[in-house]
Image (spheres, rainbow, N blue to C red):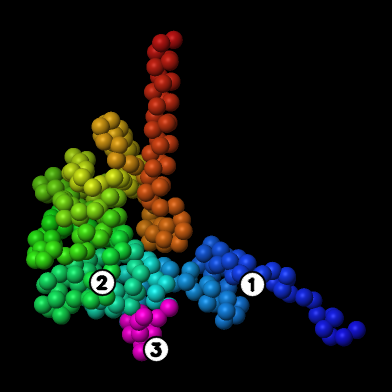
Amino acid sequence: MSQSQLQAPSPFTRLPTELVHYILQLAAASSRHCCLDICLVASWARRIALPSLLDTIVVDDEKAFLKYITDPSHMPPKPNFLTVNRIWLGYFARPNRILHTVFDACERITHLALGNCHWLALVRFSSQFGSEKGMKSNRFLMRNQDLHVTLLEAPLARWSELYYTYYATPRPPIFDRITHMRLKSLVCGYDDPPIKLHCFSRLSHLCVPYCLGGRVKLKQLRHFLDLESLEIFVIAMAEDVIRKGHWKRLEKWVRKTRETDRRVYLVESGSNFRDKWEYEMRGGESIWDQAVRYTDGWERHTNMKSAFVLDGADA
């Protein structure tokens, strides 16, 4: 018997090439670990998996990232960077440089997680101030895709208004591109002025945290609802709110508010914020869908409980 007769045929030889590629694309999109395994199979498999692998990236090492992204062999536009849609930027010493480099290299960014210093740099890139100081990003100005922004630091009470006023000539287009915003932390006490978001003309989704140590007062939350473009306002409850019995006060406020404004939603927030963000960006359920599902379940439970109490009283 010849050697060719002894060799078992590859199962892929019985499948059309297009189907094999489609299967690998689905597998690569299913998880990061699966994507890495596919990259090790062959160069052609790596090309299929790479878009899924680089769709979402987390930057922890500023020095290593800048060295890689500014290497002449990786200069934009290159396929590696064109696949990046979502990026998490840690706390770096040179926010202007790294953000400018990222936006010039990654032309398809739709989701950003960043600190206040990066946010300020982002505003500069699309403002007259940035142009005068040589910080304008022409690649950024040419884009018109919507942006989902996650702020990793607590903004000051008048942060958006101050930035908007300071760079308002001409109006920075970044404020018209942000449609979804999530705040990791928030400091807003009784004596603080209300946080105004009127400069975000198209902001439709907003998520703010609620925890016992955050100095956020319930009466301050209502100011967010003044934004007419807002469609969903999510209050993300920290674990201590539920564990220490502070839940009842928040529950009462949300129930009362939703009687006249159905834009308000609740959701429980976990302890590891970055892991939750990565899970969502890599195909997991969004915080907005989680909030709708959680609030619907909470309302059904509340209504059933109220009906049970009424039935007991009638009996």
Q: Quadrant of residue 183?
A: bottom left
The residue where tag 3 is placed is 73
Q: Is there any visible trace of residue 125 in the rendered image?
A: yes
Report the magenta residues as a range. Answer: 65-79
**Picture coordinates of residue 25, whole percent (x, y):** 55, 67
Residue type, mark 2 in image = Met
Q: Nearer the viewer, residue 153 or 24?
A: 24
Side of 8 where 174 appears, left or right: left
Query: Can you say which quadrant of the picture contains the C terminus?
Result: top left
How many residues crowd around disc 3 within 10 Å: few (fewer than 14), some, or many (20 or more)?
few
Q: Secondary structure at mark 2?
A: loop
Q: Secondary structure at mark 1?
A: helix
Residue 17 marker:
1
Instruction: From the image, give the main secondary structure of the stretch colored magenta.
Output: helix
Q: Residue furthest bottom?
A: 72
Asked if residue 62 is among those painted magenta in the image, a careful observer would answer no
Q: Secondary structure at mark 3?
A: helix
**Is residue 312 shown above or below 8?**
above
Q: Nearer the viewer, residue 251 or 21?
A: 21
Nearest-to-viewer mark from 3 and 1: 1
**Is residue 292 shown above or below 18?**
above
Nearest-to-viewer mark from 3 and 2: 2
